[in-house]
Amino acid sequence: MNGAGLAPSELEMRRAQRDRPVLLAEPGKLPVGPVGRRGLGLWGVGTLIATEAALFAYLLFAYYYTGAVSPRGWLLESHPTLKLALPNTIVLLVSSVFAWYGETGVLRRQRSRALIGFSIALVLGIVFVLVQGFEWYARPFRLSDSSYASLYYITTGFHIAHVIVGVLVLAAILLWTALDYFSPRRQLSVSAGVIYWHFVDLVWLLIFMTYYITPYLGFGR
Amino acid sequence: MRVADFRAPAVGPTTAEHESRLKRLWETSPGLEGFLGTVDHKQIGIRYIVTAFIFLALGGIEALVMRLQLAGPNLSLLTPEQYDQLFSTHGMTMIFLYASPILSGFSNYLWPLLLGSRDMAFPRLNALSYWIYLASGIFLYVGFLTGNGPNDGWFNYVPYADRDYNPGLNEDFYSLGMVFLGISTTIGAANFIVTAMRTRAPGMALNRMPVLIWGTLTASAANLVVVPAVSLAFFLLWLERQFGAHFFDPAGGGQPLLWQHLFWIFGHPWVYAIVLPAMGMVSHALPVFCRRPLVGYGIVALSTVATMVLGFGVWVHHMFATGLPGLGLSFFSGASIAIVFPSAVAVFAWLATLWLGRPVITTAFLYFSSMILMFVIGGVSGFMTASVPVDWQLTDTYFVVAHIHYVLIGINVFPVLGAVYFWFPKMTGRLMDERLGRWNFWLTFIGFNLAFLPMHLTGLLGMPRRVYTYQDGMGWDSLNMITTIGSFVLALGVLLFIVNVLKSLRGGALAGPNPWDAYSLEWSVSSPPPPYNFAVIPTVASRYPLWEGRLRESGAVSCVDQGMLLESHSKEAIGTSSMDATPDMILEMPEDSTAPFVLTLGTALLFVGLLLKLWSIVIIGTVVLAIATLFWLWPRRELREREVNP
């Protein structure tokens, strides 16, 4: 059944191979487990970010598509107020800076710097969630009012959910740093969490642009 | 004990002592804990395959009941509502619970063996993707069994899916179940991508990667970015049904077409995701029986990727009849026609392999080679409906049903059955019965074509799909009867297949490591493989490591009897660079863990709570989920995720 007639004998195979060199990997010293940012964990976070980015892309697609095919007056607020949204955007961006600052603290073996960085990032993240909650409360429309209202609450809602997850991740990193788990060599969890946090911030910029800035440019009015 | 952060791995031949140490490290413990906690890709792969086959059987039974209802005009075996639920559940089962998971199952089982590795990149994530698949499948079927199955077709168009027209829980089961299942597909895809990019054996540069890997890798990359579209669509639908949101209903300013866009942005790349890995199986195994390498490896791999890339730009061909502007239709029509080219590349590569090879006829060979024929038939009918005016004539008729079945049975089920015949010896150590295999093959082949070839004509004669019965005198009676007879012959063939599996499991001839004299690395280890797969990590010098002796190639040869031993006091594997696969780190692999199972339980509770709107259950589920996740991600010394304090 193995096509015996066609297969060369063991001897023939050896003969054919004899004057060909054998490739054998004999690497020198390799890192054992994740060292620095090298490790599969970071690839894992990369795939997570890819799929989450796609999710937000579809949410924004739903907004632009619905807005583009709807009659005039689709926006419930033709000029959404930036009074809270703009400062809150800055809060989130600054928290990203502090998360990065904390990461460099781990990489430089300065634990107090790391703790300060992660604490401030965490507090700013919580501030963002609270302000967003108030922003929801202050809107003159509710989820069921129209397709615009539904899209607004769902898109920002998905984002708040991601910020809350990010805050929990920052809290875990803060705790683990306080327990002195990390060193410049063993810190992949820190880098992975901080990259996720940057991603959550970046997504907010796109949502902010879409829901708060494009109306001023005339989209959906 | 302080362990070095850097180490040059010991290289050498394997010894009995070495293998018994590895076995101790890698073996799953017996009993319930091992059952719930195993992260062995081989066990998970077989679970995937068995579960998917159970769903195939369920979906098949649903189809047979429908075929009895349609055997003649004006029959009343089923009520219209029962028929609606049956065809919707049949579609959901076959497309979401069989076609994709079965391929994930084979890939799970085969990848580390083909790649010369000891497990997937993320073994616990692998277990999680199986458990979530199982739980979401049960969730969806609880809906069906309680009379709440989906009843609006597998692509579930609004407004029929909205609450005004569909007040029961049917669509809520389907919506939440699909979001649930999407988690499994996505994490599975992420795992495949990282596994292929980071854990190939040393020397297995991208252009030496087995062609099977290309199929699943490409499909996984697509899944990663398109599954969120359908998960989002179903989630929005659930919100619209239950919380008065407006996304799709025009009354509140929603857009019905948004559903179709979101669904097909996912749906069309997805059909490639459930055929490309199966095409990969054929490209991989057909050459074994032709006794020669695949003709055109490079362009087959490239056309796999090209199919996927083009596949992102064809979704509107499902929406030709919705009144979109002509310019848009032309673009999508053109893209849908252009996708024929990369598909044809694969067909001609297989034909050339057959032509230039000396085929050995086995049941597996018959399945793989007959797939080419059905691929061409399904491809041509797809090509026809890619043309806008032809599609306007044929859309929503049985022609489309015939097309999708040629594609999904022809390009998914047939290669999968062939793959079972081909890899069963590797998985179980025993060959399947060839005589029963021939009966099994010819019954499925004849039954399938008898059922679905005349169905093209049924569609051309204008019979609409998804009607529970039809009047006599329309010219559809005998065609439907033929289809019903064919479907039962097909079912008989599948039954024989199951009989053959069960029979061969106990009494099949012993296979030995390489019963087909095949070329890839999985055949260099015993059948079934040991828990650690490879006692020494092989070094790969060509695409056909076990055929190097007879292929007239120059250059170095692969090494399978010596290599890195990777045996300290923990499970270890080798990480290699993405392009040329040079070793760049030693991977610490996780032990068995019940965290994935607990996480799945939490997620299942969450979804049940959402379905019933019992917020206390939602909260309990979320807490369980969060605790399991925290436990999972907690940095561990043994995985070198945290500093070992002196």
Image: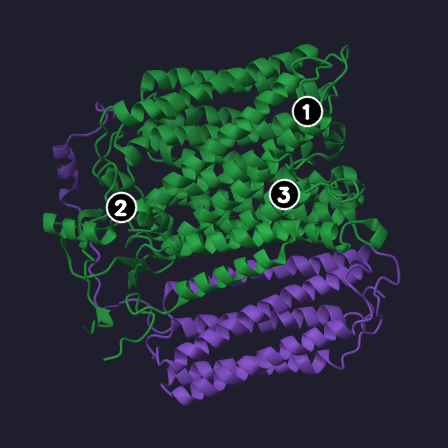
Chain colours: A purple, B green
Q: In which quarter of the image is residue A138?
A: bottom right
Camera-side residue: B621 or B279? B621
Residue under label 2, please give it: B30
Residue B398 image label? 1
Dot 1 or dot 3: first in sequence order is 3
* Local SS, label 1: helix
Q: In the rendered structure, which amino acid carries the disc numbered 1?
A: Tyr
Q: Nearer the viewer, mark 2 or mark 3?
A: 2
Query: Would residue B31 be visible to someone looking at this image?
Result: yes
Q: Which of marks 2 and 1 is in front?
A: 2
What residue is at 50 percent from the left and 45 percent from the top? Answer: B135
How far from the left and from the top, in percent, is residue A172? 45, 74
* Local SS, label 2: loop
Circle 1 Cα neighbour tier, 10 Å, few/some/many (<14 / 14–19 / ≥20):
many
Q: In the rendered structure, which amino acid carries the disc numbered 3?
A: Tyr
What residue is at 76 percent from the left and 32 percent from the top? Answer: B392
What residue is at 60 percent from the left and 39 percent from the top? Answer: B143
